[in-house]
Amino acid sequence: MSAPQQQPTWRQRLTAGLRAWRFGSVVSVFLVLVTVLAWRLVDLHVVDQEFLRQQGDVRTIRVESVDAHRGMITDRYGEPLAVSTPVQTVWANPSEMDPEDPRLAAAARLLGVPEGELRERLRRYAERRFIYLERKMQPSVARQILELGIPGVYGRREYQRFYPAGEVTAHVVGFTNIDEQGQEGMELSYDDWLRGEPGSKRVLKDNRGRVIKDLSLIRDASPGQDLVLSLDLRLQYLAYRELKAVVTAHKAHGGTLVMLDVNTGEVLAMVNQHSYNPNDRSQLSSERLRNKAVTDLFEPGSPMKAITMAAALESGRYKVSSTIDTSPGYRRFGRFTIRDARNYGVVDMTTVITKSSNVGISRIANDLGGDVVRDLYFRLGLGQATGIGFPGEAVGVLPSPPRWRPVEEATLSYGYGLSLNALQLAQAYMVLANGGTRYPLSLLKLEHPPQGERVLSERVTAQIRDMLREVVEHGTGRRAQPGFYSAGGKTGTVHLVGKRGYEDSEYKAVFAGMAPIDNPRIVTVVAVDAPQAGEYYGGEVAAPVFSRVMSDALRLLNVKPELELGQRPVQRTGERG
């Protein structure tokens, strides 16, 4: 008979239960973990796949801007005056860099900065992720820096503005800042036209922010539009050379020259002294930035006598054959005295202009009345904007008192008591040159003939041109004769205004004229400020500049010479203007 089985004790039963519970717990936890992992795999690969892909891209794919190419500025024949060239900008991420890296010595040498200054800068901005090391440098130098392999140093392509004609066209073209935003001249006036629209692209970067490759183009950069100016670069160089020469020779404070096409109103040349180089602005002064031809006002003086004479002929009260008594060579208006160089006695209208008689022209103006003279001044464009849209253009002052005093009428007749800029004076003479039509002036090349407004008759303007011819051939403007071309014009020698009124020893020498006189093609105004060496008269300082510029300019424009060697006007001694 077998022995009865021994029943497990309570301790044994407890131990067995704990073992079973532990096993079940482990299996349960394992099953839960497997289930969670399985669900997570499903969630990652099915449910959240698109979201996670996007998040991954955000951490590796970036959107960068694509710089737009700024439009080019050219002269009327396509010669470049302002272009944008590709350059390299070198930047750094200081947080990735070691200021003690020995390769920084070579980098500093290529950057042109002291080594210690570069290392100190990296220490100072160690927490930053972006600083410029050098903007818009030569690509070849930037490449040498990047080839050093310094961690945290990167390059980026940008554009830099370059001005091939330098100081010759600086006052018209202007310049941009380092971000290619217009700051002066036509660069400023037409900034929206020239400036392009930046694009954008997707790039793949590594964990240090370095671009591995371009992935796709989001929006292509839209380049700026080109701007074609009315300037003829050949004439611009010619005018600049001659103006600089006279300012240097006479140690003048400055000068201005403006040249217009009489049949379109286009500005063919516009130069000033002193100028500046827009490619190197390291020592630039605000004084040199002004385009004096449109921003600086002055009293024009004797060139206005031709316009006063036109008002007299237009009125019908005077003819070319009319005579004026200029005796005794001066006129008094209270404490103010008007004088001629000498007593010319009774002279005809042409002689009044040829001899530049203040007494004669003032008598005519007093007879006509101030409103008659002022009205013609206004019709020729004085006292109002020329419409070229140049920044900082000065309008000038054309007086219009409720009642004219005789002295005001007298001084207005020969160019005092009003102010204008050189461009306005050229516009007024353009009307005399083209037969009486006032065209809007333009610094842009015109594709179609402009619509002008007749403000004077052809008969009157022809008579005035004959008088201006006499000024160049026998009067105060003899030195303005442009070689083998006929010309006409008027000299002026104007007292400059100082802090205490008119300066006794400071003058502006002026000449305004046209050529060829029988069928004018060009009008040119020359103004030289405060000649200090030698003569200061308009006929001695400004007229020779007109002669040289017009002679060469007409040849460049293929205008056939009118005069043979034996037909050139005789240079005779006469009055100085």
Image (tube, rainbow, N blue to C red):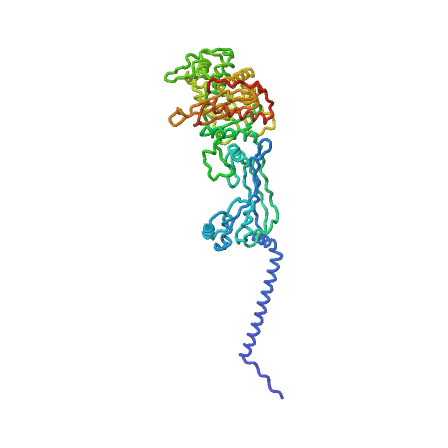
Residue at x-position 58% and y-position 68%: 28
Q: Who is closer to the viewer here, 443 or 272?
A: 272
Q: Is residue 113 visible?
A: yes
Residue at the farthest left position: 335
Looking at the image, residue 307 sits to the left or right of residue 218; the answer is left
Q: Is residue 213 above or below residue 248?
A: below
Q: In this view, does 546 lie above or below 181?
A: above
Q: Is residue 530 visible?
A: no
Residue at the farthest bottom position: 1
Horizontal and vertical percent for residue 572? 50, 18
The quadrant holding residue 499 is top left
Q: How many labels does the image show?
A: 0
Q: Is residue 248 above or below residue 122?
A: above
Looking at the image, residue 328 sits to the left or right of residue 550; the answer is left
Residue at x-position 59% and y-position 39%: 223
Horizontal and vertical percent for residue 48? 60, 55
Q: Is residue 498 above or below residue 56?
A: above
Residue at x-position 49% and y-position 47%: 112
Horizontal and vertical percent for residue 35? 60, 63
Q: Who is closer to the viewer here, 195 or 139?
A: 139
Location of the N terminus (image quadrant): bottom right
